[in-house]
Image (spheres, grey):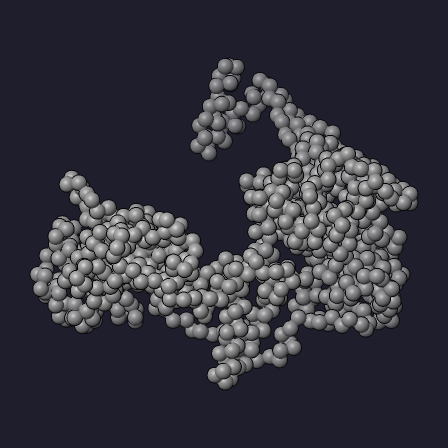
Amino acid sequence: MTFPLLPAYASVAEFDNSLSLVGKAVFPYAADQLHNLIKFTQSTELQVNVQVESSVTEDQFEELIDNLLKLYNNGINEVILDLDLAERVVQRIPGARVIYRTLVDKVASLPANASIAVPFSSPLGDLKSFTNGGSRTVYAFSETAKLVDVTSTVASGIIPIIDARQLTTEYELSEDVKKFPVSEILLASLTTDRPDGLFTTLVADSSNYSLGLVYSSKKSIPEAIRTQTGVYQSRRHGLWYKGATSGATQKLLGIELDCDGDCLKFVVEQTGVGFCHLERTSCFGQSKGLRAMEATLWDRKSNAPEGSYTKRLFDDEVLLNAKIREEADELAEAKSKEDIAWECADLFYFALVRCAKYGVTLDEVERNLDMKSLKVTRRKGDAKPGYTKEQPKEESKPKEVPSEGRIELCKIDVSKASSQEIEDALRRPIQKTEQIMELVKPIVDNVRQNGDKALLELTAKFDGVALKTPVLEAPFPEELMQLPDNVKRAIDLSIDNVRKFHEAQLTETLQVETCPGVVCSRFARPIEKVGLYIPGGTAILPSTSLMLGVPAKVAGRKEIVFASPPKKDGTLTPEVIYVAHKVGAKCIVLAGGAQAVAAMAYGTETVPKCDKIFGPGNQFVTAAKMMVQNDTSALCSIDMPAGPSEVLVIADKYADPDFVASDLLSQAEHGIDSQVILLAVDMTDKELARIEDAVHNQAVQLPRVEIVRKCIAHSTTLSVATYEQALEMSNQYAPEHLILQIENASSYVDQVQHAGSVFVGAYSPESCGDYSSGTNHTLPTYGYARQYSGVNTATFQKFITSQDVTPEGLKHIGQAVMDLAAVEGLDAHRNAVKVRMEKLGLI
């Protein structure tokens, strides 16, 4: 039995949390409050009921049915309805859980087990008889009942519906307080045959797992309700405030009764070492089954040793997801009772790992199961497409890339392919943004909240190096910048060319007199503090440091912060430090990934907070950049969502096969999630074969051949008939790098609408743009070239406008301003012009 009381509230907003231990509540039905009611129901452990208090017209009945279905399907327990309306609802909604609100003389017409709500004024003998010996739940309602009426009704097995404003968890009340103590209502329902008058009390947690057996009394129960804690009756020492000396306190969540009313169950949230005096969770021994496994996994989440299987499951999302799918398949194939039990246990294990990883408890899972059991609408029950047909296991696995054999792009003849085949060929490798965001968020939050401590811990975890400080401050030691002379010359030449090209992009202040006396200006100002992310990972990219650092310096910034992941020995590549020195960087953050982005966005004890973050990176870096940009508390913008590298080459029969192959491979070696596309214009099979041979022959000679092999596996050659068709497909794809290895290449540049950077002609390999030509190699990827430009001088600037209006200017535009302000109803705007024009004698 639940607590013998149903508190009634005027709205969800008036819910009194101190009464939550009653375990249930009733709210009035209101169509415009449906969302709030459902949201509350889904967020609470309470049994939530709804009362339809007003009459319903024929026009409103269909809306009521629709809304009741929504309420039932989202966890509402029961609905209180007038008898006639309830009978109509039950006909329309099979399985509807209703409480029939009726008068005494109508009860006999109802089913013997139907819940009813009748007036308090009904004779007590009738009310008691309506319970049918306990098989029917009977509620009594009144706005004027006295406490004596309430307690005598409860003693007869009736549940009163009381306005929550009349209830209190206090029990020592002055005479002027006209509220009903909740404890007195509960005590009225209890009986005991013990000579000492105590009530046997079972203590359980929210999962209904028994913690121990104690006693309660007419003194301890009111005190427990008042304090909302575990207070019991010691047979030797009086009131026992659980945990008062040991610290193992209890928060009281609810009180329930057994069917005879002579035994209580306290539902608590236990803290400390546990309930038992032997410092165990329960006096009845350790938990087992799902509860025991949950406790073990939550412990291993924090304490599993590095390299252990469980630690790998928590850290490797791909592995965990694969194991869940594997065990689900094996459960589906199991036939014997023993095999089904075994495979089901395996699936539960990996499902619980996922729950623990994301902080989901079994209580939350069970709450969702309870919600599903309360649904009254039955779904058709079909499986999603792709799950209904049996397929061989190997077909459902990701495509495996052979570790040897010929390296070649997939081939599609556009004239023979369907539009879907072409679209699939141009689709980038899928980035599971939602899953990546889930992985990145705790990293970003950790750095934001814990600063340097988190940064050092994450660097140790992801980069495998224990640092004493996360920052290398300028001036940088000479010994960390030792480079061969040829490398220094190459960097210096590249810096000089990038500087020249980006200085040429600086703009003078723009001034326009839009009409006599009105001068509008636009001028640039540098973004003061910039964070430059230099990727590490499978390749160290010092070129990115100069591509970001030089424009930042040209733009006139006040503070440059570098960030780059350290090597295993804790040092950085000397090329990056040398460039940081050349561009005047303040410091270098010795971290990579999402943690480096978070440190620059929010700042730490040693990392300066930056106003804008620049630089390419993997999916986790991109996700972190997008996340901090969307956090208004960070006040940090980004250059663009730059992800895995890509190239699209347009080549014709005049192109050198070796040149084409080298351009494709120069991007393929970046990473397995990179993509290369070749659009072959009017080529014969023989001409294409020469390019294919060149790709394979050059690829097998590369140190990063295994990365190239995996990239080429999801890259494609598309044969097209004309240059115009090739350019149209290129614009559709919007590549990061577009290489034109075609006859008269420069004449086609005007047709390029979407690309990060264009490389024109046979002697313009993408590598030149990566290092030394002068253009910037930090470019939009993944199709973002449709909306974004590559990094340039303006990326490090913001533009401010100004206007200087003279009296003559106000004469020309003042009336127009006032008229438009009047149209928009902004009188203060209008008045700001009006008072000036009046003083000038213009109106």
Quarter occupied by residue 411: bottom right
Picture quarter with the N terminus: bottom left
Query: Residue at the location (48% across, 16% down)?
Result: 838
Q: Is residue 449 visible?
A: yes
> Could you say where residue 205 lies in the image, as x and y percent from the top left?
37, 60
Position of 486 with respect to 536 (left or right) is right
Q: Is residue 700 left or right of residue 142?
A: right
Q: Is residue 191 left or right of residue 810?
A: left
Residue 452 at what x, y percent from top left?
63, 42
Q: Is residue 77 visible?
A: no
Q: Quadrant of residue 89?
A: bottom left
Q: At 50% across and 22% down in the image, what residue appears? A: 833
Q: Residue at x 73, y 61 (%)?
A: 672
Point 43% across, 67% down: residue? 287
Establish if 810 lies above or below 658. Answer: above
Determine whether 789 is above or below 743 in the image: above
Residue 582: x and y, percent?
81, 36
For the residue pair 543 and 386, the one nearer the viewer reads as 543
- The extreme front residue here reads 236
In the rendered image, the residue lying farthest to the right is: 485
In the image, residue 377 above or below residue 338: above
